[in-house]
């Protein structure tokens, strides 16, 4: 059986799981409603007590929407961060925290890091199968946009070659990310540092001109300004990586004697296996560390997995409380129309028909709340995605997935089964006192 299950495509596995989760409610509905058509009476009861019914549906919708929104947002966060690190095959830096280096190089979070010297950089750049070895230089900004020094090859790779305008040709030119509020031809002066502590006058003599804009990447680099790495070194009064007789050169190769240092080198190889070889070469017995940002993210995902378990537990507890409220609410609502139910029984209506009416009333409220909660959850996830994207500059989308549909199907089946309890309690009420009440 497991072999058959494992042989099924993932889509069919998800469909089967959802059908299995819905099966109890479908079977229950068929058994309870067999031979009866209670819907005209149920519609009348819903209209008669429409105020209480609407409040009840809203309670269910909020509960379901919260659960769906949390599940969808957690999945969207994983996908967004994975996409942000997609272009960073391998990162080499001085020994330290991989997470710190990843946050600085991939997500552009300001950090203090040790520098790699020119000899080490040249060794990386000249290693076999290295297609791109881009040094990164941090430390400056313009408004909310970090100014990042790198190479033309990496800038083109980051934007997949889609650059409006042209690549820089001198150290006084720059490329703007798609979210940077500068147009081609605009000039600016970079500030030293980031945020409120940035010193706008530290590089007063530096005037950089935007010559091109990068295509959207859906990452924090969309809000960055990319400049030749030589520019960052020069505005800080350092050598620009080239011997004086080649001082106007932009990009590699660099002269180790005039290489000021770089906190990280982003490496892209011609083959996947070469990345593993490079990681081994620049980690073992060296004053460097090499790591895959994707692997570091996987470790963070394990932590997020624990967080997801906690979130799922919170959602489960919430759903249990809501389920208890649902049962109590159904019983209270059934008390509102107990005279009508007692009259049905006094007129000789079969007990099973009365049971079907009460259960159908609760089922209608539960299904309406679940469907409305699905829309509420999608809307909540969309709003949360925009808020998180605005704060992190990572494009996060949280479309409806199978996990949310499975959650909804399970909620429907459990609550429909539990709604049998109020229907049974209604049947146990005496007829005559109910008619007199």
Image (tube, rainbow, N blue to C red):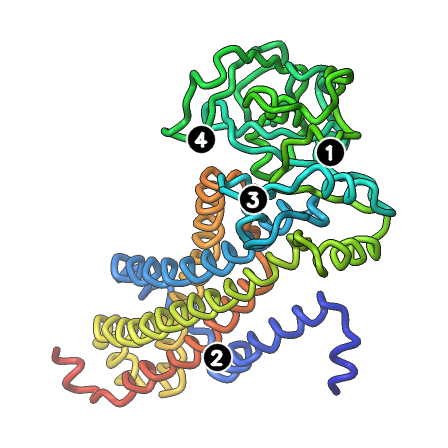
Residue sitting at x 51%, y 84%: 31
Nearest to the eye among marks 3 and 1: give it: 1
Asked if the residue at tag 2 contacts the one at tag 1, i.e. Cβ–Cβ closer than 8 Å, the answer is: no
Q: Which residue is mark 4?
A: 194
Q: Percent x, y for residue 421?
A: 34, 84
Asked if the residue at tag 1 contacts the one at tag 3, i.e. Cβ–Cβ closer than 8 Å, the answer is: no
Note whether 265 is above or below 257 in the view shown.
below
User: Is residue 374 in view?
Assistant: yes
Q: CA distance from mark 3 to mark 2?
A: 72 Å
Q: Which residue is mark 2?
A: 33
Q: Earlier in the sequence, mark 2 or mark 4?
A: 2
Note whether 165 is above or below 14 in the view shown.
above
Q: Earlier in the sequence, mark 1 or mark 2?
A: 2
Q: Which residue is mark 3?
A: 114
> In this rendering, would 371 be left or right of 117?
left
Nearest to the eye among marks 4 and 1: give it: 1
Q: Report the quarter where the N terminus lies.
A: bottom right
Q: Earlier in the sequence, mark 3 or mark 1?
A: 3
Number of other residues with Cα within 10 Å of mark 1, as a class: few under 14, some 14 to 19, many 20 or more: some
């Amino acid at each position: 059986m497991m072999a058959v299950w494992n042989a099924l495509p993932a889509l069919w596995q998800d469909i089967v799981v959802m059908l299995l989760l819905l099966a109890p409610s479908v079977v229950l509905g068929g058994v309870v409603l067999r031979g009866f058509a209670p819907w005209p009476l149920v519609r009348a009861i819903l209209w008669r007590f429409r105020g209480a019914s609407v409040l009840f549906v809203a309670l269910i919708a909020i509960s379901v929407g919260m659960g769906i929104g949390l599940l969808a947002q957690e999945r969207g966060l994983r996908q967004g961060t994975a996409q942000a690190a997609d272009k960073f095959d391998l990162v080499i830096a001085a020994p330290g925290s991989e997470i710190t280096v990843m946050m600085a190089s991939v997500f552009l979070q300001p950090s203090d890091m040790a520098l790699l010297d020119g000899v080490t950089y040249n060794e990386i750049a000249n290693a076999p199968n290295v297609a791109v070895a881009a040094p990164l230089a941090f430390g400056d900004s313009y408004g909310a946009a970090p100014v990042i020094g790198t190479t033309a090859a990496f800038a083109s790779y980051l934007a997949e070659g889609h650059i409006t305008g042209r690549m820089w040709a001198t150290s006084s030119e720059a490329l703007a990310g798609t979210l940077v509020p500068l147009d081609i031809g605009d000039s600016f002066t970079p500030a030293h540092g980031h945020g409120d502590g940035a010193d706008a006058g530290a590089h007063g003599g530096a005037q950089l001109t935007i010559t091109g804009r990068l295509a959207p990447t859906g990452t924090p680099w969309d809000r960055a300004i990319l400049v030749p790495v030589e520019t960052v070194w020069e505005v800080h009064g350092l050598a620009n990586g080239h011997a004086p007789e080649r001082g106007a050169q932009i990009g590699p190769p660099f002269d180790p004697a005039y290489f000021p240092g770089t906190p990280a080198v982003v490496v892209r190889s011609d083959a996947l296996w070469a990345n593993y070889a490079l990681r081994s070469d620049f980690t073992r017995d060296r004053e460097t560390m090499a790591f895959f940002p994707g692997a570091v993210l996987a470790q963070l995902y394990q932590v997020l997995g624990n967080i997801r378990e906690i979130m799922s537990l919170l959602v489960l507890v919430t759903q249990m409380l809501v389920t208890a409220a649902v049962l109590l609410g159904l019983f209270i609502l059934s008390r509102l129309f107990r005279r009508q139910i007692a009259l049905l029984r006094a007129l000789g209506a079969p007990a099973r028909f009365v049971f079907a009416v009460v259960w159908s009333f609760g089922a209608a409220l539960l299904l309406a709340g679940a469907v409305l909660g699905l829309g509420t959850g999608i809307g909540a996830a969309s709003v949360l995605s925009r808020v998180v994207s605005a704060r992190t500059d990572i494009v996060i989308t949280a479309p409806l997935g199978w996990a949310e549909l499975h959650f909804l199907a399970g909620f429907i089946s459990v609550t429909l089964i539990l709604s049998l309890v109020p229907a049974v309690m209604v049947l146990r009420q005496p007829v005559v006192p109910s008619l007199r009440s």
